[in-house]
Image (cartoon, rainbow, N blue to C red):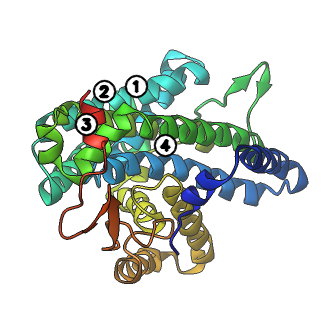
Amino acid sequence: MKKTISRFAADLPAWAKVILFGLLGAALITFPIAYPKSYVMGVICRMLMYMILAGSLNVINGYSGQFNIGHAGFYCIGAYTEAILATKVGLSFWIALPLGGVMAALIGLLVAMPTLRLRGTYLAIVTLGSSEIIRLIALNWEGLTGGPIGIKGIPSPIFFGFKVSKSIHYYYIFLGLAALFFFVTYRVIHSRVGRAWLSIREDELAARSLGVETRFYKATSFMYGAFWAGIAGAAFAPYFRFISSDMFSLDEGFNILSMVIIGGQGTLLGPAVGSIIVNFLTEFLRPISQYRLVVYALLIIVMMWLRPQGLAGASNSILAGGVIKLGRHRHTHTHKGNLPKGSAAEGGK
């Protein structure tokens, strides 16, 4: 398959894009009205939330080439920030929501600053440890987080006097947040910042030699991904009405990572595809839930063997070991990807 879904969409004429997105938007908005099953709405809410989580991790791993496997820590920060502000301070959900993202972004910066010179396994170990530290702080700081008991009775959002309390109501919140995430991320990826991230992913040394402030852009990537993970966590807290530290364990971090790998790193739609598949498997395998992670591991192994670029990745991508064209010459990818045409130069302007 030579074209990805995103490439196919990019090749469509403007009028076709308007019609396509209009039909898609109408279908998503009217779906709960046509099929208002509470169980189905709950599953779709989780899919939309994990699209944000996996997509934000993909910004760090797939676009800037870093290796974060502790994304559950930022998710935890967003959830606890919203829950604490709502239950102890009495702030509205609509104020606590962005604050959860900002708090996660600040912690993301604290994690990123000492690790900007690390790559690969070393960076992965640090992010894994930071995620576990965050979870243990939430577990033991009883005065603030409730400790092992967690935080109960998180108030539901109020929207112009209407109390959001059912899955069908939360569906529109998660849908709006997911749509906002993909729109903003698309614009960022196609901006100077996104080109700088791509140049760092392809060859950090070459990017630095062309004037890209690699440390700044790597920290920015970490903060951006952490911000949206915090947003997802802040939206999750009132939806579930209860949070505890065991919801943000290492298993959750690997669960998010599996969605990125299965869907395709470095693609905008890949994490969305991975989220749908993994959440569908979660429901399908619920009778044997204790073996769920084994199935995920086998699926990842098969994906790395047969299609390492993921389901939404192009067959001629770097991860697939294919070739790309730079100018009039063809370059074969080996252990390092080649610098995309103009990406580093654009990022260094």
**Type of amino acid at the residue the image marks with label 1:** Val
Query: Given this view, does label 1 or label 3 mark the residue nearer the observer?
Result: 3
- The residues bearing labels 1 and 2 have C-alpha atoms spaced at a distance of 6 Å
* 1 or 3: tag closer to the N-terminus: 1
Above or below — where is 92 with respect to 272? above
Q: Quadrant of the C terminus?
A: top left
Give the number of the disc on residue 106.
2
Instruction: Name the element at disc 2.
Output: helix
Q: Residue 269 lies in what quarter of the image?
A: bottom right
Q: Which residue is mark 3?
A: 345
Q: Residue furthest right?
A: 34
- The residues bearing labels 1 and 4 have C-alpha atoms spaced at a distance of 19 Å
- The residues bearing labels 4 and 3 have C-alpha atoms spaced at a distance of 45 Å
* Residue 209: percent from left, percent from top: 11, 39
Instruction: Name the element at disc 1.
Output: helix
Kindly check if marks 1 and 2 are in contact, taking CB atoms under 8 A apart as contact.
Answer: yes
Q: Which residue is mark 4?
A: 243
Kindly check if marks 2 and 3 are in contact, taking CB atoms under 8 A apart as contact.
Answer: no
* Residue depicted at x 53% and y 67%: 3
* 2 or 4: tag closer to the N-terminus: 2
* 1 or 4: tag closer to the N-terminus: 1
* Residue depicted at x 66% and y 58%: 43
Query: Given this view, does label 2 or label 3 mark the residue nearer the observer?
Result: 3
**Type of amino acid at the residue the image marks with label 3:** Ala
- The residues bearing labels 1 and 3 have C-alpha atoms spaced at a distance of 30 Å
Left or right of 191 on screen, residue 154: right
**Type of amino acid at the residue the image marks with label 4:** Ile
Q: Which residue is mark 1?
A: 102
Q: Residue 5 lies in what quarter of the image?
A: bottom right
Instruction: Name the element at disc 4.
Output: loop
Query: Given this view, does label 1 or label 4 mark the residue nearer the observer?
Result: 1
* 2 or 3: tag closer to the N-terminus: 2
